[in-house]
Amino acid sequence: MAKVLVFIDNPGQALKKSSLELLTIARSLGESVVAVNGELHDDVARTLGEYGARTLYLPSADDLDDYLVGPKASYLAAAVHASAATVVLAENSAEGKEIAARLGIKLGAGVITDVVAVDPDGTAHKSVLAGSYTTTAKATTPVSVLTVKPNSVTPEPAAPAAAPDSVTVGLPADATAAAARVTARNEKPASGRPELTEARIVVAGGRGVDGNFGPLEDLADALGAAIGASRAATDAGWIGHDAQIGQTGKTVSPQLYISAGISGAIQQKAGMQTAKVIVAVNKDAESPVFEIADFGVVGDLFQVLPQATAEIKKRQG
Amino acid sequence: MKIIVLVKHVPDAQFDRHLTGAGNTTDRSESILSELDEYALEAALQLIEARGGEAAGNKVIALSMGPAGAVNAVKKSLQIGATEGVHLSDEALAGSDAAATSLALAAAIRHLGADAPADLILTGMASTDGETSLVPAQLAERLGLPQVTFAASLELDGGQLTARRDGDTHSDTVEAPLPAVVSVTDQINDPRYPNFKGIMAAKKKTITTLSLADIGVDASQVGSAGSWTAVETAEVRPPRTAGTIITDEGDAGIQLVEFLAAQKLL
């Protein structure tokens, strides 16, 4: 049976939904093992067992977070050798993709990013050119490395659960030699909202918000959604660059994408194309966004959004 | 100082883009210099200008790998201000995945560094066609160099670089010794446009064309033969169709919520 190694970087106090998704996919491909970096809490170890992990690999060094990418790829390569895994699953974050990239070269393994589903034979499904094509791709190498987008599967625990063994993986002596070192880290204030790339619902604003994201934030909070923005809105300085969706920003594929004051130019459409349901609010009836919206409102977002927020709160009691 | 900037000729994202042929490769007929690479080029130009420019022996080499048309990305880079251009072109390169692309680019970079190695290899944060962001990291791995990706600021001091990297939950300052591979975001600078003087000056600049033989790479190491991944099927996603469009007559917010409730999204 194929061995599948899931990489979970800094699980913290509880596993993220995207990590549970990776574990769920891993079980459908073979026997799953997990390589963790960072502190491993007992609760997390237990959850890993509940999701089918048979063995947990831990690095012999605890300073991998002090460097960018390279040493984590060295650690994972060692974990792949130790476990004899033939499939590696990692998060589809910017860092996850880069770790996968370097790991691929170290192992001579094909890397496929932005994966949304994996068949039992390892065929990966993804969409390319901003959602205009769906493709299947396969690594032609003995080991394959896949980075999987969030919201790709529904997490399901394994039955029966077993307590995983843990194994420490030694790092090569030169693992940190040619690596960029993190010399200062400034934590950003937490917004309390879900992470944009993982959110089930995204409320995104564009030029039409005219500097005022307030009504979008209220709606997002009522829905438990993340806030996104078009490049016009981030370039105008109305909201942080972190919120930017689309070609030069983040890719999102939520269940629901609410677009407010976004015209839907081709690059903006690209950012929302893979959402399951699109709702658009825009004053201009000619906006291209209405060509792809499942539900569109031609109207003033400063009237429509607060009314929607109030109605949601009323229904929630 | 010698800086190599990787520039890519990519389909213009202003138009619909297509896959083509048996290998499902990207149709490059309506292509331009990748917008994201302009930030890397600007960063390189600012770094050499701060060090006395070309007069002080600094240079920026724009390197592009791709079919005949890719030379246009090199030409545009020269108009913007790159010192010289290099076009790595060989029919065998067609269909290369990130692993094969990074192998060819690493060989080209070693070739260009035969007399004096580059101090810095700069790239955009992603290509706007493949969008995998794999190549800068794979290049760093192949060259055995530190990588600093998604740099939102970049300073060099002697043999050391310092960059800022903005993540979702934290912003990091990172340091690495040179030479290094650095990818930059669109937050790092405001790229300049080519002006008339630049366009005229570019006509006198050299563009070197390199083949696989020139860089010591065998055809079997690149293209679909040398790739470690293969696209098996590609289907045009059915275009999204417009749903219900209403005009606000005072209750659109409530109708919106009713739609969400009907879709079980509340």
Image (cartoon, rainbow, N blue to C red):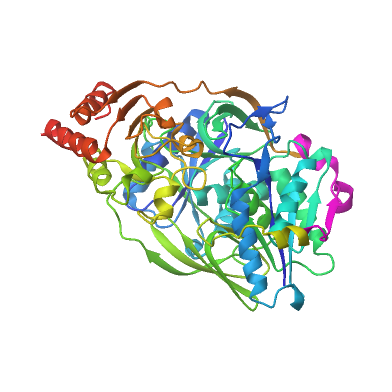
Q: Residue at x 84, y 41 (%)?
A: B219
**Frontmost residue, B111 versus A87:** B111
From the viewer's perspective, is residue B124 above or below residue A17? Answer: below
Residue ranking furthest to the right: B213
- Report the front residue among B110 and B141: B110
Asked if residue A170 shows in the view, the reply is no
Q: Residue at x 41, y 37 (%)?
A: A263
Residue A102 image point, x, y percent: 62, 51
Residue B67 percent coordinates (x, y):
78, 41
**Compared with residue A88, is residue B168 higher up or lower down, i.e. above or below?**
below
Does residue A57 show up? yes
Q: Could you say which quadrant of the image residue B167 lies in?
A: bottom left
Q: The C terminus of chain A appears in which quarter of the rendering?
A: top left
Q: Residue at x 62, y 69 (%)?
A: B46
Q: Is residue B211 left or right of residue B60?
A: right
- In the shown orientation, is residue B45 left or right of residue A167? right
Whether residue A292 is situated above or below residue A229 in the rendered picture: above
**In which quadrant is the N terminus of chain A drawn?**
top right
Range drawn in magenta: B202-225
Query: Looking at the picture, how far across and down is residue B238, in whole percent?
Result: 51, 20
Is residue A317 toward the left or the right of residue A92 in the image?
Answer: left
Q: Residue furthest front?
A: B196
